Amino acid sequence: MPLITQTTRIKAPAKRVFDLSRSIELHLQSAGDTNERAIGEITTGLMTEGQELTWEGSHLRFRQSLTVKITEFHRPDSFTDEMIKGPFSHMKHVHRFEESDEKVTTMIDEFDYSTRGGLLGWFIENSYLTAHLRRFLAERNKVIKRVAESEEWREFLKDEPLED
């Protein structure tokens, strides 16, 4: 089972980075290359504990859907989403946020997954999928950083009471 870990330092308070990380609209903006969209009951707003969300997008030239559930939620320190339906045999994404005294947040993604399909799944995982998922997470984190460090964050969190 591959574990992808990415760390991003962001010059913004942890609460802001945490909330941007659970914004459906910001996720869709960061996933533009995959034509991702939210389908189902929840398609906008901020993800929260217990919610189930379904994403549909093109990954490695295949149209896929993935349903996740927010299984843990500790604002502003961490939240976890886990696949309940989709292409993996297992997928768990832990999002952690550590704020320093200088209002710099270290955002840590731990993306743990495994594929279906035995030897063929292992080959795809090691040949293409892990690299694709690393790029996908890196692009997502780049967008979160850009938005959090500018005034653009207000567009995504305008209805949320935030303490800077």
Image (cartoon, helix red, strand yellow):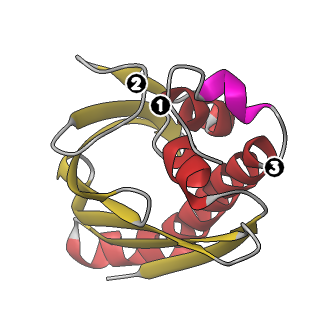
In this rendering, the label closer to the viewer, 3 or 2: 3
Q: Amino acid at mark 1?
A: Ile
Q: Is residue 40 toward the left or the right of residue 17 in the image?
A: left
Q: Which residues are magenta?
A: 152-156
Estimate the spatial distance between the alpha carbons at disc 3 and disc 1, rounded to whole Å: 19 Å
Please name the residue shown 40% across and 81% down the image.
2
Question: Depth check: 20 or 40 in front?
Answer: 20
**Could you tell me residue 64's position as x and y percent?**
37, 37
Estimate the spatial distance between the alpha carbons at disc 1 and disc 2, rounded to whole Å: 8 Å
SS assignment at label 2: strand
Q: Amino acid at mark 2?
A: Ala
Q: Is residue 100 above or below residue 107?
A: below
82 part of magenta stretch: no
**Could you tell me residue 82's position as x and y percent?**
24, 57
Which comes sooner in the sequence, label 3 or label 2? Answer: 2
**Residue topped by disc 1:** 24
**Residue topped by disc 3:** 149
SS assignment at label 3: loop
Please name the residue shown 22% across and 65% down the image.
116
Which comes sooner in the sequence, label 1 or label 2? Answer: 1
Marker disc for residue 2: none
Q: Is residue 119 above or below residue 132?
A: below
154 part of magenta stretch: yes
Q: Is residue 44 above or below residue 119?
A: above
**Residue topped by disc 2:** 38
Graded by Cα atoms within 10 Å as few (under 14), some (14 to 19) or many (20 or more), the crowding at tag 3 reads some
Please name the residue shown 66% across and 48% down the image.
164
Q: Are marks 1 and 2 in contact (CB under 8 Å)?
A: yes
Q: Amino acid at mark 3?
A: Glu
Question: Depth check: 124 or 15 in front?
Answer: 15
Quarter-wise, where is residue 95 in the image?
bottom left
Q: Is residue 122 above or below residue 131?
A: below
